[in-house]
């Protein structure tokens, strides 16, 4: 009797302990996807996250980074689906690339919504950011922290762009969210969607005349060497990055490790944002100087000229506000106004 009670007790103890034990069966390696590698703030942010996770979990969670969105053969607009499905375990991804699956993420691409870095901060750190994280969670992925790709400026090989008229008929590579097709069409240009991997050869061969990307990307990818000699600082949108984890992977980690991964993402995100803004903010314009030193003509449209861009893209803003959710757009506008 005593013996069987003892056996029962042991059995119960095992039954209770078992799920906990199973929960902590970790993979030897977790795959982290990014578009850009360590020559860019984006890739450095991913690398830093992996490093901090290893440190904070005493090596229990071991992350390997796969830049170039190589886990989805470079097709960055399929990255979010791959995270959801578990082909990718973790990612530091752009709002643009995930917006085909999470419609709320189109918010950041609304032309001229974010006039400055303070606006970007207001969105990421405010109620808007929380609502965006909820939308990502609703889509089955766990969001942890914000990073930044940056304000996307427009370059081309043909001529200086000061007003929309200068863009007329020009062929631009745009990222794979249909909002960009609408924006560039509204400005009288000819947009073509293609992945980042295809963009560089297309610029080099002259298949397209121009592209838009943050200055850190323009420099890191040496875009001036493929004939992009004109750059316009129009700041039409700021592209945030988001640190995320696949839901099942997240649930397989202990509470303690989940918190370690979250803290690592928060820290890596902060550091990445500082890096993405280095040489562009706070009276430091080193990156702009570097661009000019490469023989690139930098154009800064005045207020009236910027207003022309804004006016022509306003119908795109209105149309996409409905897709994003009018309430969310209103919330974002209010948080920017109160910054
Ligand atoms: O493809 C781009 O332009 C890039 C690298 O900026 C993104 O992934 C959004």
Image (tube, rainbow, N blue to C red):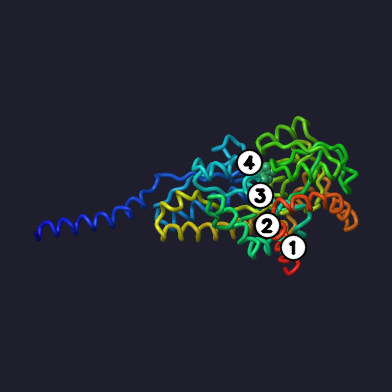
Q: Find disc 4 in the rendering and name its residue.
A: 77
Residue 189 spot, x, y in % from top left: 84, 40
Closer to viewer: mark 3 or mark 4: 3
Disc 4 or 2, which lies upstream in sequence?
A: 4
Image quadrant in which the C terminus is located: bottom right
Res. 263 mark: none
Q: Residues within 10 Å of mark 4 (few under 14, many from 20)?
A: many
* Label 4 – label 1 distance at C-alpha: 27 Å
User: Is any part of residue 220 visible from this angle?
Assistant: no
* Label 3 – label 4 distance at C-alpha: 13 Å
Residue 70 spot, x, y in % from top left: 56, 37
Quarter of the view holding residue 304: bottom right
* Left or right position of 308 against 135: right
Q: Secondary structure at mark 4?
A: helix
Closer to viewer: mark 4 or mark 2: 4
Q: Find disc 1 in the rendering and name its residue.
A: 333
Q: Is mark 1 within 8 Å of ligand 1?
A: no
Q: Find disc 2 in the rendering and name its residue.
A: 278
Disc 3 or 4, which lies upstream in sequence?
A: 4
* Left or right position of 117 against 82: right
Rendered view: 185 above or below 257 = above
Q: How many marks?
A: 4
Closer to viewer: mark 3 or mark 2: 3
* Label 2 – label 1 distance at C-alpha: 26 Å
Disc 3 or 2, which lies upstream in sequence?
A: 3
Q: Find disc 3 in the rendering and name its residue.
A: 103
Closer to viewer: mark 3 or mark 1: 3
């Amino acid at each position: 009797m005593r013996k069987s009670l003892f056996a029962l007790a042991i059995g119960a103890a095992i039954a209770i302990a078992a799920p906990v034990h199973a929960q902590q069966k970790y993979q030897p390696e977790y795959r982290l996807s990014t578009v850009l590698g360590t020559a860019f703030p984006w890739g450095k942010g991913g690398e830093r996250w992996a490093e901090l996770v290893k440190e904070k979990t005493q090596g229990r969670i071991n992350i390997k980074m796969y830049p170039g969105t190589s886990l989805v053969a470079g097709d960055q607009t399929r990255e979010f689906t791959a995270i959801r499905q578990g082909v990718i375990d973790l990612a530091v991804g752009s709002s643009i690339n995930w917006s085909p699956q999470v419609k709320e993420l189109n918010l950041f691409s609304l032309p001229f919504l974010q006039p400055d870095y303070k606006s970007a901060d207001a969105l990421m750190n405010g109620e808007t950011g929380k609502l965006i994280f909820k939308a990502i969670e609703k889509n089955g992925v766990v969001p942890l922290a914000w990073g930044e790709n940056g304000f996307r400026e427009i370059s081309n090989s043909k001529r200086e762009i000061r007003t929309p008229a200068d863009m007329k008929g020009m062929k631009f590579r745009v990222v794979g969210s249909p909002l960009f097709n609408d924006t560039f069409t509204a400005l009288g240009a000819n947009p073509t969607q293609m992945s980042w991997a295809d963009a560089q050869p297309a610029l080099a061969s002259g298949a397209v005349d121009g592209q838009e990307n943050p200055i850190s990307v323009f420099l890191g990818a040496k875009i001036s060497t493929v004939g992009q000699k004109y750059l316009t600082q129009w700041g039409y949108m700021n592209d945030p990055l988001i640190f995320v984890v696949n839901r099942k992977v997240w649930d397989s980690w202990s509470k303690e490790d989940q918190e370690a991964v979250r803290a690592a993402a928060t820290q890596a995100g902060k550091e990445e944002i500082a890096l993405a803004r280095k040489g562009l903010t706070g009276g430091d314009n080193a990156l702009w100087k570097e661009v000019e030193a490469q023989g690139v003509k930098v154009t800064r449209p005045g207020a009236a000229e910027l207003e022309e861009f804004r006016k022509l893209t306003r119908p795109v803003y209105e149309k996409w506000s409905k897709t994003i959710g009018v309430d969310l757009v209103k919330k974002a506008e209010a948080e920017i106004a109160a910054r």
